[in-house]
Amino acid sequence: MIGTMAHAAPYVGYVYPNETDIPWSVLIVIYPYITGLVAGAFIVSSLYHVFGMVQYKPVARFALLTAVSFMFFVPTPLLLHLGNPQRAFNAVLTPHWTSAMAAFSYVAGFYICLLLLEIWFAFRADIVALSKTTRGPLGTVYRLMTLGSDDVSPHALALDHKFATVLAMIGIPAAGGLHGYVGFLFGSVKAREWWSSDLMPIIFLLSAIVSGIGLLIVLYVAYSRVRKVPVDDACMKGLARTMWAFLLVVLVIEGLELLEMFYKRLEGIDMVQRLIEGPIRYGMMIQWGGSLIVLAILSVLIIFKVDGKALVRGMVVSGVAMMIAVLAMRWNVVIGGQELSKTMKGLLVYYPEIVSHEGLLAVAIVFTCPFVVLWLITRFLSPWEPEPS
Amino acid sequence: MTQQDKIIESKGSNLVRRNFFLRMLGIGTACAGAWVGSGNLRANAQSAEVAAAPSPKIPDYDWNKHKWAFGVDATRCIGCLRCVEACKAENGVTQDAHHFRTWVERYVYLEGEDRAHVDSQSDAQNIAASGSEKEFRFDNRYRDAKVEKAFFVPKLCNHCTHPACVQVCPTGATYQTKDGVVLIDHSYCIGCQYCVQACPYGVREFNHVMGVTDKCTWCYHRITKGLQPACVEVCPVEARVFGDRNDPQSPISKFLRNNRVSVLKPETGNAPNVFYVGIDKEVS
């Protein structure tokens, strides 16, 4: 068999010969990223549904639809990455339980079911109303979606609300579990110095939440523009505070982890330092620079009680910057971990392919899909409260 | 498909066909283990699963009667790389500089320097010297240098007692045999490469044509017929030693008895079964 390794990674120092074939590509960067966006969006919805924070009401149902749209595509990068995707169900039908990865389909499947159930309860009154006013095939779909329950009495609606609350309460640990689990996938790999950290699940989870809030801000503002309605100031201020708090915690934890690593100076720290100064230099600059910029903007918005257009602008910049910073963090972890050789005597450099099933084009397509699906879902099931006439 | 692949595949299909009830029982037991939070219970369920797996259909071979192990005497290795060549030929390993089931590292300490210069046959200068990625040679770059100390270290799968690769495999496609060898069922591997990540020794490589992970099997197709692994067979200086630890007179039993041995990266807890003599602190 003659090899065709067009994408062998260049390296410096000494690396094991097999390491030049980088196992996990940019697709595996996008996998925890999308999962994180789901977790973040869901948490915002729960702030309203569970904690009764009414300022989040304008985006609560939209956040649920956002979460499910992205959740549908969480398995896609994984499937594209597999050498034998047709065998993916082997891990479902005959899971090997000592493997964290074996739990993926169960964790993800449970979470999708939970999201769909919660969406059904949160939208049931709308679905019933639409089933009565819509004609044609679409009307049939709405009628099927009522599942035969068209009771919209105050008692029934109160019951819906209670169910949605209970599901959201289950959903918080589930969202935490889903993303903490992704962190565990990396943190439990003792062979990789850059991954093997007990803090990995918590760092993944917290950064997931801030990236999800960022996504929600951007989408909410974009949708408001399209719908030509004003952005809710109270909601924006609430999101600013929530993002600020989670961001602060994640920065402190990540900072402390780096500090401990460099203070302890265990064997191999020189190479870790060279990794940070070398292959992931720009990634680290984007991750930390972006996060600190967001923290600064949010602090200004909160301290000076900025509102109106300036608030919206500041929040959109923060949202976009946060999403980019967290994407860079995912890159730094997933790719950075593989660029640090297991020999601890060398560094590899990963260059993503452009056009291949694991290339940047595939990533762009996978990442576009949830937005398209979200747009279609919101056309079908509007999450917005009717405007007071 | 090589002979080795055929054997692995026939063994693999046995595993695929393993009794559904036992499989469900295994899952149930494992779930219960997770529920009560008992690591031991889960570990027991796993060993029960291995015990329940039918013995591979290899004539005159009983995997319960052997305990294979490998020894490397780095003081003997001359870096001729015949082992690498034999391994590639025997096992149909991808013929390029990025896929190896075994390789050899060269450690050179120059006068006045604290750290070793390390390279393997995959190094660009060595490939230039051999003229091809399919031929293996160490170049003569240290001819005019003042070398204080130099040695070669053959590397291969450590067939660990607690293999991290087996632990992380989501389907159980990679598994440990009763005789202590870690194998991959190519017909069941989904190609996620989690095992490639988990191996601290970098011995796993990805076969892009088949979409599955591959690695050294200690030439399982040979050792189960009473032969030596190809790399051991061709080594001209007996730097590689292989045998059955259950037999006190086997080469490996004598090797372990007569030498003070070490293993690579013991801190990982994987408990490797490739034992080294004559390696330096820089070897990892």
Image (cartoon, coloured by chain):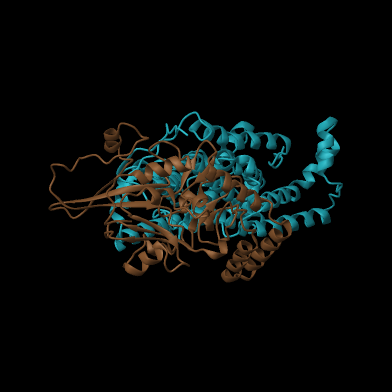
Would you identify the image quadrant in which residue A196 lies? bottom left
Q: Quadrant of the N terminus of chain B?
A: top right
From this view, report whether residue A53 is shown above or below residue A306: below
Would you identify the image quadrant in which residue A74 lies? top right
Which chain is tinted cyan?
Answer: A
From this view, report whether residue B262 is shown above or below residue B149: below
Q: Position of residue A61 (x, y in %)?
A: 67, 46
Front residue (pair B56, A255): B56
Furthest-top residue in view?
A355
Q: Residue at x 43, y 48 (%)?
A: B230
Q: Residue at x 34, y 36 (%)?
A: B135
Q: Position of residue B83 (x, y in %)?
A: 37, 46
Q: Quadrant of the C terminus of chain B?
A: bottom left
Q: Is residue B133 visible?
A: yes
Would you identify the image quadrant in which residue A68 lies? top right
Q: Position of residue A164 (x, y in %)?
A: 72, 55
Answer left or right for A163 relative to B124: right
Which chain is tinted brown?
Answer: B
Front residue (pair A265, B233): B233
Answer left or right for A89 relative to B202: right
